[in-house]
Image: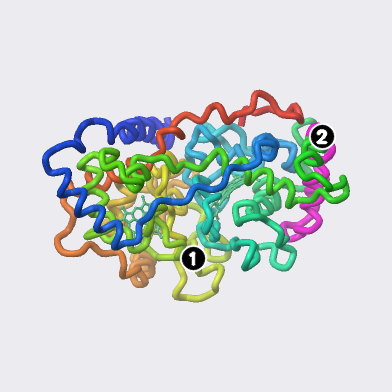
């Protein structure tokens, strides 16, 4: 059994415990009022306010977007969809340390490589709450982002369309483009034995690839009708990648907004929603343990970039492989090397393995790494990543020095180190960030697809 399969079992049980955390009567003990006074004052001082839920999405658009999200017809070989890597049963991610792209088969921890398939360079990000206003920075390294006022930037450069409603919609143009992700490699037939008309383009032929993806959708009568109905006034010739993107984003916003957690209820004034342990954990998180200086606000992210010296394990990325310079690859500045976007911690216990490369298979290790990166780098065991990546951990003294040399100074605990009981309180707080309504999302999987393609992986 793979490490990640074991992990998922553990994660689910932790999640269920977490979801019940507020109802175990703990919050009604005699010390609760003092705790609440202290916590509400801290949350106010730190500017932690209830998150504004995204506006209700157009139901027709959501229904169409749901099918497109699961639709393999949009990939070169008709063998992979958004849902393959962002699956409702896997915390809107894929349960692997690094995701297996084009040509792999199976879902989540059962997914195995085909002849040519490769690991994508990073751990699949979850897509919880990405439709919330202000979520303008996407990817572990922030290489796509924007909003309707400031415009959008993306790896497509000048070809980036500017008429998206938000960065979540803009994101759609990226996964459909690279050969290793959804487009496919030259010379390989699709699952039905047809040639792949997108395969001979290159990864930066953005403007040529997108119309071919749109044509795939428009060739299915159901999608053609649904797209024309969803965008009144548009003709067949007007429908482009932005329309597919808007529909998919409407679905993702509708399905993966997870803002009814015990913590949200507490922020809304229900002081019984958190257990005492969760309240003590929140006090540490936004207080002495300093987590909130990067994981700030009610979504636990400043949308900024920091180096916390996560173990350099896995494929690495680009010319620096087996290292991954993260944000430094985008800005080309030395001081940005090894920085990654602060992850939101919403539904965090549902989406392991953790870190930009899935380095940790255990959430508590992930948290403890922050408390003593040097010790965790020295003791790191790469048997917790996908078996093909065993032996890839960059354990040299030199790499360790490189990582620790530019460690973010915000990574500090005020005063004495955290005790085991305090770490356990922090973990309890993280479980208060899980929305119970998202624990079972099987209902999101369509019964069938308009293309007739399989929903198995
Ligand atoms: C082969 C697996 C795979 C497929 C298929 C895939 N993704 Fe992803 N997705 C990832 C990985 C890996 C990342 C993180 C990449 C990075 O940061 O470098 C990611 C990141 C994202 C993010 C960014 C979230 C954030 O917080 O920045 C969104 C949104 C997203 N994917 C949506 C989609 C959509 C929509 C599709 C289908 C059009 C899709 N993905 C297809 C693996 C996949
Ligand atoms: C200096 C800023 C900073 C501080 C302080 C900080 N973190 Fe992080 N945290 C990050 C960054 C950046 C990452 C992602 C690093 C990577 O993947 O290389 C991260 C990753 C995580 C993850 C894994 C998220 C995921 O999606 O994989 C968890 C859990 C986490 N932090 C919890 C905490 C807790 C609890 C504290 C306080 C003890 C804390 N962090 C303090 C910046 C910070």
Q: Does residue 267 appear to the left or right of 342 in the view shown?
A: left
The image position of residue 120, as x and y in percent, is 57, 50
Instruction: Describe residue 413's horizontal placement relative to residue 398 as left or right.
Output: left
Q: Is residue 437 left or right of residue 411?
A: right
* Residue at (42, 62) in percent of width and height: 302
**Residue 106, how many percent across, how many down?**
58, 32
Residue furthest to the left in view is: 30
Mark 1 lies on residue: 325
* Residue at figure coordinates x 26%, y 38% from the top left: 272
Q: Quadrant of residue 384?
A: top left
Q: Earlier in the sequence, mark 1 or mark 2?
A: 2
Is label 1 or label 2 in front? 2
Count residues near mark 2 (Cα–Cα under 10 Å), then give few for <14, some for 14-19, many for 20+: some
Cβ–Cβ under 8 Å for marks 1 and 2: no
Label 2: element kind: loop
Q: Position of residue 164 (x, y in %)?
A: 68, 56
Residue 203 is covered by the magenta coloring = yes
Q: Please report the bounds of the magenta region as a residue range.
A: 193-222
Is residue 117 visible in the rendered image? The answer is no
Q: Quadrant of the C terminus?
A: top right
| Residue behind label 1 places its C-beta within 8 angstroms of ligand 2 | no
Label 1 neighbour load within 10 Å: few <14, some 14-19, many 20+? many
Image quadrant where residue 418 sits = bottom left
Q: Is residue 417 visible?
A: yes
Mark 2 = which residue? 220
Asked if the stretch drawn in magenta spans residue 282, the answer is no
| On-image quarter of the N terminus | top left
């Amino acid at each position: 059994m793979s490490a990640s399969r074991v992990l998922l079992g553990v994660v689910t049980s932790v999640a269920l415990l977490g979801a019940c955390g507020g109802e175990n009567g703990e919050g009604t003990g005699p010390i609760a009022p003092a705790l609440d006074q202290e916590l509400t004052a801290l949350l106010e001082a730190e500017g932690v306010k209830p998150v504004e839920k995204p506006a209700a999405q157009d139901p027709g658009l959501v229904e169409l977007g749901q099918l497109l999200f699961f639709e393999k017809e949009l990939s070169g070989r008709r063998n992979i969809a958004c849902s393959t890597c962002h699956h409702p049963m896997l915390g809107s991610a894929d349960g692997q340390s690094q995701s297996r792209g084009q040509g792999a088969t199976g879902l989540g921890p059962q997914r195995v490589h085909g002849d040519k398939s490769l690991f994508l360079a990073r751990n699949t990000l979850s897509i919880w709450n990405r439709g919330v206003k202000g979520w303008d920075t996407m990817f572990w390294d922030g290489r796509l982002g924007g909003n309707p006022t400031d415009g959008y930037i993306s790896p497509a450069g000048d070809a980036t369309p500017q008429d998206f409603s938000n960065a979540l919609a803009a994101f759609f143009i990226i996964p459909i483009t690279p050969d290793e992700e959804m487009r496919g490699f030259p010379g390989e037939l699709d699952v039905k034995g047809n040639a792949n008309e997108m395969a001979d383009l290159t990864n930066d032929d953005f403007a040529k690839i997108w119309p071919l993806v749109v044509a795939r959708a428009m060739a299915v009568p159901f999608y053609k009708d649904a797209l024309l109905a969803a965008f009144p006034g548009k003709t067949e010739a007007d429908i482009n990648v932005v329309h597919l993107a808007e529909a998919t984003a409407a679905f993702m916003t509708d399905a993966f907004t997870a803002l009814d957690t015990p913590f949200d209820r507490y922020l809304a004034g229900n002081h019984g929603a958190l257990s005492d342990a969760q309240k003590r954990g929140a006090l540490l998180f936004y207080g002495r343990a300093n987590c909130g200086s990067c994981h700030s606000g009610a979504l636990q992210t400043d949308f900024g970039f920091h180096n916390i010296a996560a173990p350099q394990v896995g494929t690495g990325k680009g010319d620096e492989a087996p290292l991954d310079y993260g944000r430094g690859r985008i800005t080309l500045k030395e001081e940005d090397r090894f920085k990654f976007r602060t992850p939101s911690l919403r539904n965090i216990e549902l989406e392991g393995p953790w870190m930009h490369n899935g380095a940790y298979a255990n959430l508590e290790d992930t948290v403890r790494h922050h408390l003593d990166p040097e010790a965790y780098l020295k003791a790191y065991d790469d048997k917790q990543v996908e078996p093909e990546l065993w032996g890839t951990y960059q354990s040299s003294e030199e790499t360790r020095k490189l990582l620790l040399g530019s460690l973010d100074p915000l990574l500090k605990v005020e005063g004495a180190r955290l005790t085991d009981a305090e770490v356990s309180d922090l973990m309890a707080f993280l479980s208060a960030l899980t929305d119970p309504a998202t624990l079972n999302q099987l209902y999101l999987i369509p019964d069938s697809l308009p293309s007739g393609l399989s929903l198995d992986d």
